[in-house]
Image: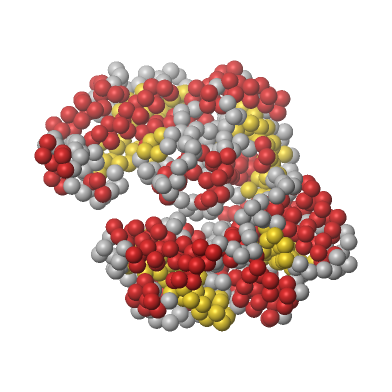
Amino acid sequence: MKGIHQPTATNSAPTAANGAANAPRGHRITLAHGGGGQLTDELITRSILPRFGNDVLNDLLDAAMLEVPAGRLAMTLDGYVVQPLFFPGGDIGRLAISGTVNDLAVAGATPMGIALGMIVAEGFEQRQLEAILDSAAATAAHAGVRVVTGDTKVVGRDQADGIYLTTAGIGMASNRRYHPDQVRPGDAVLISGTIADHGLAVMLARQMPQVRSALKSDVAPLNHLIESITAALPDAVAFMRDPTRGGLAGAGADLATRTGWHVTLDEAAIPLRPETHHAAEMLGIDPLDVANEGKVMLVVRDGTADRVLKLLREHPLGRDAARIGRVDGERDGLCDIRTRLGGRRIIQKPYGEQLPRIC
Amino acid sequence: MKRITPQQAIASLHAAAARLSRPAKFMEVCGTHTVNAFRSGLHALLPENVELVSGPGCPVCVTAQGEIDQMIELAGRREVTLCTYGDMLHVRGRDGSLADARADGADVAIVYSALDAVQRAADQPDRQVVFAAVGFETTAPATAVAVREAAQRELANFSVLTSHKCILPALRALLDSGEVRVDGFVLPGHVAVITGYDLFTPIVADYRLPCVVTGFEGEQIVAALARLTEIVADESVALENLYPQAVSGAGNQVALGIIDEIFEPADTCWRGLGDLPASGLRVRAQFAAFDARRRLGLPPAENHEPPGCRCGDVITARITPADCPLFATACTPVHAIGPCMVSSEGTCQAWFKFRRTPALVNRKNHLPICEVLSGAAE
């Protein structure tokens, strides 16, 4: 916040004189950038189009036009308010694209277009904004998804904390149904890799910036990983979920509640990095409750579990994939976990705010 | 220390339990032990004749209601920024919680270290920054360091509202009350790192009860229970340390030194135990400028309990959470009434979250899980 309180530097290039005493701060976003006038046009033509340009976006119509084959559409929306904006392993731009791509992908949809909304606080450094846009563009390119429309608003410097992003996504739904009602007793529960990396990396970066840790957010678009499974083994997957807020505990408890079946997890099988384990211990947090931004929990038919695991592990984002549990025949709608000690306990959704603003 | 496997620890516990002539009940007095015992599923693995109960070990839970009211009162003042550890946020006082005060516009900040609060005071010279300092000997050194740092930086806008407690007077009061029968203590590793395990010699000498210091993994707690059970089965008594990698007899002299430099023992009120002589820590007169009670002028704490709440009886192991009529009905983690349900280290929250194995949940005297989970049982 401190860096923003320099009222005169708003929109002029730093001079050599003030640059010597006070490092040049560069251009800043002003209210006029969001005013719909010439500065807005400048922002679009200089900062947005060079990064995201495509034949749909370049039209700059009030609404993007997409060619759609016959079938069902999937649509999703998410807001991003994470602090800090840049954290080990990612930033708000990568998060905003990945989150929306993943919401479509776990629903079995192929992402077709993303709408990107930005609310920026007056005085936000243009250089930071461009770094965020670079990251969002690189992530979208990696996922093979186009940003087809967008919006920018600028609010007073005290009315927002730096920048907030909103992404909406539209995708072609598959003709298969990935839904809790497809889950059957005997199904296996898989996770595509280590848990709790994102939430703990962000918490550490914000709460204990002095602590050095190898911990990195797992934020990544999962559509290619998921498509590699659903394309090769179309009958294997019953249901998928990206365990973001609420973590694996939330996803597991929800799976049990929504299906009505008992779900048993195996603590020893759940992949967890040592550095994540240490950070969780230090902050007094259960890794099961912590958000992931680059993991998918899959419920697959028992006989296919090994083949799905093999495919997951062949993909760079699924190297640590593991079989972590199963769906049982009891109709109690509970999720429990077999602990390392050999005991059992019920898994519930975390209560209330864990720590705000991790996504 | 040689690392024992969970299976070895459980096997030795069961072997010792087979030699007991009567059931044994042990008490842990540390929030982390409470949580990890439940989280590891330990209770279900205990022999039938060995029980582990929780004592006054959760810092939030033992804080008297009047002191919580004082925090909320201070937070409501226009010029005050109240810094606190996260668990305190949702504990209810007479008029709502700190979270409610924050929603009403109070400046309440969650910090992970007392020094963060000092820095906040330095960054915001026009605000009175108050650190609400709770906890046992574990957190007291950090508060003391913060006061010393603020004194060295001559900060005129930093103070601490202390509710620090000392564990030994609480154990003595509990045993002296005669209301709670235990056969030994699993001693808190965190506290003992600071105080040293010699502190607990009086429990062995005066009350003839075995004590074992241990770490926080499920198997370490089981190992402590196994040793306690062996000692009881041998009709012996001893003070043992199963956590030598962190805990010594004499403790951390640097940390004890700074506690002594900044604080002096004071009579303190505990939830569930009442006023206990020399059981807490007060800022010494020399540092009075950093004592929020003296600097900002606070009315004396008035103690009262939320109606129907039996947290005081829970933290002294007079009852279990299930014996409280509010447990899992009106009082749930999402809509908590007492601090033991608010705190992630509280016995009630641990029971609510972990104790109900599928078998327990399906017992007739328990509420249907769906009602409990949705909080609809209120």
Q: Which residue is drawn at 65% across and 73% down?
A: B171
Horizontally, is B287 left or right of B20 in the view? left
* Residue B153 can be seen in this image: yes
> Which residue is drawn at the image coordinates 60% and 29% (left, top)?
A321
The answer to which of B20 and A237 lies nearer the viewer is B20
Residue at x-position 68% and y-position 81%: B177
User: x and y percent of residue B276 in the render?
Assistant: 57, 80
Q: In this view, does B142 lie above or below B161?
A: above
Q: Which residue is drawn at 28% across and 41% down?
A: A119
Q: In this view, does B137 lie to the left or right of B123?
A: right
User: Which of A173 and A95 lies nearest the eye of the viewer?
Assistant: A95
Of residues B200 and B179, the one nearer the viewer is: B200
Quarter-wise, where is residue A87 in the image? top left
Q: In which quarter of the image is the C terminus of chain B?
A: bottom right
Residue B263, how many percent across, how many down?
46, 73
Colour scheme employed for the rendering of this structure: secondary structure
Residue B185: percent from left, percent from top: 71, 66
In this image, A41 relative to B99: left or right?
A: left
Count of numbered circles in the view:
0
Q: In this view, does B192 lie to the left or right of B129?
A: right
Whether residue A100 is visible: no
Q: Where is residue B358 in the image (x, y as percent from the top left)?
A: 72, 51
